[in-house]
Amino acid sequence: MGLKTIVSAEAGKQELVITREFDLPLELLFKAYEEPEIVEQWMGTKVLKLENRKHGSWQFETSDSKGNVVLRTNGTIHEFVPNQKITRTFEMENTPYEVHLEFLDFEKLTDDTSKLTMHIVYRSVAMRDEMLKLPFAQGINMAHNKLQEVAGKLR
């Protein structure tokens, strides 16, 4: 079975386009990005801050089984339109990866299905290509599978 989340990386471009259709109503898909308790469940991370508003900020922290912090991510929310879009920066602290810009667009397909399109822009093609060396596609697919599972139980 292939990956349900599609990661498109056009050669020579400093961007990724990630798409996923969910068996979730639009409002429920958006809520999975908006509500800290739901974000924590599907991302497997602790939400330290999530200010869902223009000029808001966010910060997440991931720990190992012993409680040691292994990754902290953060950014600024530049645009927040409920059930439509989130524009934000994304930075992984203490890594060689530079901050990038994410445009998340939420689309209603039917009353029971929706689509997420993530357009991610990196500073350079080289930085985008470095990110793709990680198990990026598998990781985001696993996260989206978990989002589908967690949010599906909220119906």
Image (cartoon, rainbow, N blue to C red):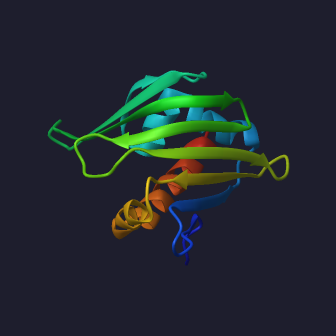
Residue 135 at x, y percent in the picture? 36, 66
Q: Determine whether, in the image, residue 58 is placed left or right of residue 2.
A: left
Instruction: Name the image quarter holding the N terminus.
Output: bottom right
Residue 10 at x, y percent in the picture? 57, 72
Q: Is residue 17 above or below residue 90?
A: below
Q: Determine whether, in the image, residue 132 is placed left or right of residue 120.
A: left
Q: Is residue 155 visible?
A: no
Q: Is residue 52 above or below residue 27?
A: above
Q: Determine whether, in the image, residue 132 is placed left or right of residue 30.
A: left
- Quadrant in which residue 7 is drawn: bottom right
Residue 24 at x, y percent in the picture? 71, 48
Instruction: Name the image quarter holding the C terminus.
Output: top right
How many callouts does the rendering have? 0
Kindly identify the residue that appears in the image at 43 percent across and 35 percent down: 40
**From this viewpoint, which residue is outermost toward the right?**
110
Which of the pair 152/47 is nearer the observer?
A: 47
**From this viewpoint, which residue is outermost toward the bottom?**
1
Kindly identify the residue that appears in the image at 32 percent across and 51 percent down: 97
- Quadrant in which residue 25 is drawn: top right
Kindly identify the residue that appears in the image at 59 percent across and 51 percent down: 148
Which of the pair 86/66 is nearer the observer?
A: 86
Q: Is residue 13 visible?
A: yes
Kindly identify the residue that appears in the image at 50 percent across and 62 percent down: 14
Residue 17 at x, y percent in the picture? 60, 61
Q: Is residue 28 above or below residue 100?
A: above
